[in-house]
Amino acid sequence: MLLEIVYIIILIISLLYVTPRHYMKKILSKRRTNRIQLYKSLLNLFAKTCVYMFFQRFSHKNVKRISKNTYNVSFTIGSNLYTLQIKCKGGPSNVIQIIDDQDNDITDILSPFINFSENVDIVIPNLESLGYKSATYNMATGDEIERIGSDPVITEI
């Protein structure tokens, strides 16, 4: 929340004070507007940015940050809930552009798959990292599997 407020303040300062005067005069002369209309449009932009950032916070509840560059990603397929723990390496993508056989730019479509394979490692958590000392798994076959703190959560079935 604090980062969002700082971002909004920097945005307002850059729009109002950092913009050179000759650039503002150029905008005012081209649009044939006065200063009040310019400030109204800036305020409108600010309000839309705030609303967008507000709703964006609720749409990303399925991604939870665990530590630096480590996240839990939860999703549902059918009626089953799945969770992956991923570690992001960060850094820029190695792919600059992807073009298909008809010379269409398809970078936006394929780069997320490539970025995932290059920059993300799937981590198998252990019980200690999740805050548990031990766990007993009661399986559908009737078997019981005991796990202690340093054992991975995933079992071989």
Image: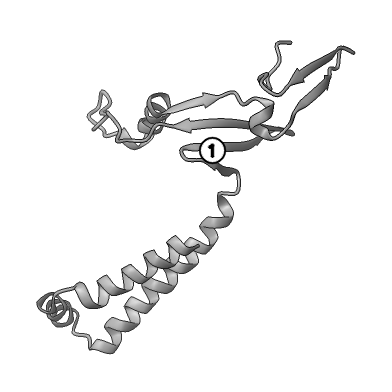
Q: Is residue 78 left or right of residue 8?
A: right
The image position of residue 138, as x and y in percent, is 85, 20
Which one is nearer the viewer's eye here, 62 or 137?
137
Specify how the rendered protein is coloured. Answer: one colour
Q: In the displayed image of the protein, which residue is found farthest to the left? A: 22
Task: Give x and y (percent) for residue 55.
Answer: 54, 60
How many other residues sit within 10 Å of disc 1, few (<14), some (14-19) or many (≥20)? some
Location of residue 18 with respect to 149 vertically, above or below: below
Quadrant of residue 119 within the rendered picture: top left
Q: Residue at x 51, y 56 (%)?
A: 56
Q: In this view, does 134 lie above or below 14?
A: above
- Nearest the viewer among 157 and 153 is 153
| Quarter of the figure with the C terminus | top right
Image location (x, y in percent) of residue 131:
70, 35
Please state the horizontal and vertical placement of residue 24, each as a whole percent of the image: 16, 78
Q: Quadrant of residue 156?
A: top right
Name the one closer to the observer, 42 or 151. 151
Q: Which residue shows up at 32% across the image and 68% down it?
A: 10
Q: What residue type is labelled 1?
A: Tyr
Q: Nearer the viewer, residue 25 or 69?
A: 69
In this rendering, the count of numbered labels is 1
Residue 19 relative to residue 11: left or right: left
Give above or below for 41 relative to 6.
Answer: below
Task: Look at mark 1 in the image and give the residue it sits on.
Answer: 71
Q: Classify residue 35 as left or right of residue 66.
A: left
Element under disc 1: strand
Q: In this view, does 144 lie to the left or right of 92?
A: right
Taking the spot 54% from the left edge, 38% from the top edge, the residue there is 71
Q: Quadrant of residue 148?
A: top right
